[in-house]
Amino acid sequence: MRRSLLLATAFVTALPWLAYADGMPDEPATPAAPAAPSAPPASTPGSWPIPDAQPVAYAVLIVSRERLDTGTACDIDLYVQDEKVSRLQPEGEVALNLPPGEISLRLQTANSGLCRSGIQPLRAQSVQLHAGEVRKFRIANSESGLYLMPVSSGS
């Protein structure tokens, strides 16, 4: 035990000399003063991003297809602003987030399989959407063809 105490004492007294042996200076250098930032940093670690002043506003348009209302087993394509956005099968439904304003909607029987025919594209319907509202339509059939029928909020 006495021998280990002597070794420990010798090691502790040699520590100051070991500090010079590694080539490092005795005292750490003082860091240079940071330059004044020209603009505040975009975000700092651990901080939450600042939300936009106005959130993006949109309306929700829901289009459903009941088997009995359309009178056809063919798939039906839904066009928004003359771009195909969905193909609805019987009992199908789609929900779209759209910008507020006047939106052009059009339906067309899918031109595939047994449904190939010379059916001309149907006329478009216009719908006025407001930010934050949810509008629901059901595909229906009349003498002039397929159209979108508004559904009351209770249905």
Image (spheres, rainbow, N blue to C red):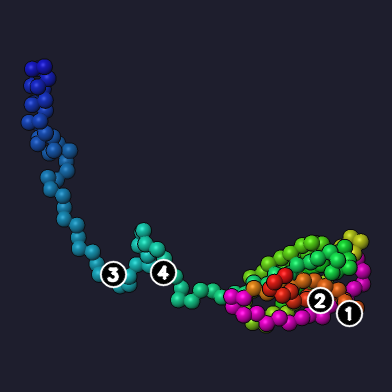
Q: Secondary structure at mark 2?
A: strand
Query: Label 2: which residue?
Result: 147
Q: Mark 4 belongs to which amino acid?
A: Ile
- Is 87 covered by the magenta stretch? no
Marker disc for residue 37: 3
Mark 3 vs mark 2, foreground winner is: 2
**Position in image of residue 138 (x %, y %):** 77, 71
Q: Mark 2 belongs to which amino acid?
A: Tyr
**Residue 100: quadrant of the picture:** bottom right
**Position in image of residue 88 (x %, y %):** 78, 64
Q: In the rendered structure, which disc, 1 or 4, sits on the residue that comes first in sequence?
A: 4
Number of numbered discs overlaid on the protein picture = 4
Q: In the rendered structure, which disc, 2 or 4, sits on the residue that comes first in sequence?
A: 4
Q: Secondary structure at mark 1?
A: loop
Q: In the rendered structure, which disc, 4 or 3, sits on the residue that comes first in sequence?
A: 3
Mark 2 vs mark 4, foreground winner is: 2
Q: Are marks 4 and 3 in contact (CB under 8 Å)?
A: no
Q: Nearer the viewer, residue 83 or 29?
A: 83
Query: Label 1: which residue?
Result: 144
Left or right position of 26 against 71: left
Magenta range is: 116-133
Identify the residue at horizontal 81%, vertical 76% (top origin).
147
Crowding around mark 1 (Cα neighbors within 10 Å: few <14, some 14 to 19, many 20+) is few
Q: Are marks 2 and 1 in contact (CB under 8 Å)?
A: yes
**Position in image of residue 145 (x %, y %):** 87, 76
- Is 118 covered by the magenta stretch? yes
